Image: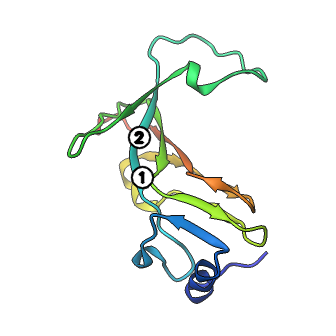
Amino acid sequence: MSVLGREKILEAIEAGEIKITPFKKENVGCASIDLTLSNQFRYYKPGLGPLAVKDDTNYKDITEKFALKEGECYLLLPGQACLGITEETIHLSPRICGLLEGRSRFVCSIILVVSHFTIESCFIGSLGLVFSFISPLAL
């Protein structure tokens, strides 16, 4: 596996091997594409006891979905986690795979962005992220 540089990423997009909707050319870096966090989130329902992890365990049973309105904020308290999703939809051809990683600027706020995973070839969809706040201060 090799890493594509900016020119090769743009060529792959032009050839339809990588499709990003909505696409912003200015989000293509020297060997990456910046994605945007959408306003759609899921938070874990309060008061849950231990979770039995089984084949039929469904995250929708233990989380609540919400959407932030324009200008609205979500208060992430110490020890909390929430799920986010990208605004963009990604479609990769059989020849392309990728990696999703959180941005390092969030580390300064003591927010763990758990998102390092492989995006397999032929993937179609939006990408999920888990935010876990480990600081003693509310943000």
Find residue 94 and report its image quarter.
bottom right
- Provide the secondary structure element on which disc 2 rests: strand
Horizontally, is 1 left or right of 85 in the view?
Answer: right
From the viewer's side, name the closer residue of 17 and 70: 17
Mark number, residue 40? 2
Q: Which residue is at the far left?
A: 71
Residue sticking out furthest to the bottom: 7
- In this view, 59 is above or below 1: above
The residue at which mark 1 appears reads as 37
Where residue 6 appears, x then y in whole percent?
A: 55, 85
Is 23 or 58 nearer to us in this picture?
A: 23
Residue 24 spot, x, y in % from top left: 42, 73
Horizontal and vertical percent position of residue 53: 72, 21
What residue sits 46% from the left and 32% below the top?
42
Q: Which residue is drawn at 57% across and 19% down?
A: 61
Residue 8 higher or lower than 128, as above or below: below
Q: What residue type is labelled 2?
A: Gln
Query: How many C-alpha atoms fall within 10 Å of the one at disc 1: few (<14), some, or many (≥20)?
Result: some
On-image quarter of the C terminus: top left
Residue placed most toward the observer, 134 or 127: 127
Q: Which mark is residue 117?
A: none
Which SS class for mark 1? strand
How many circles with numbers are drawn on the protein?
2
**In the rendered view of the protein, which quadrant contains the N terminus?**
bottom right
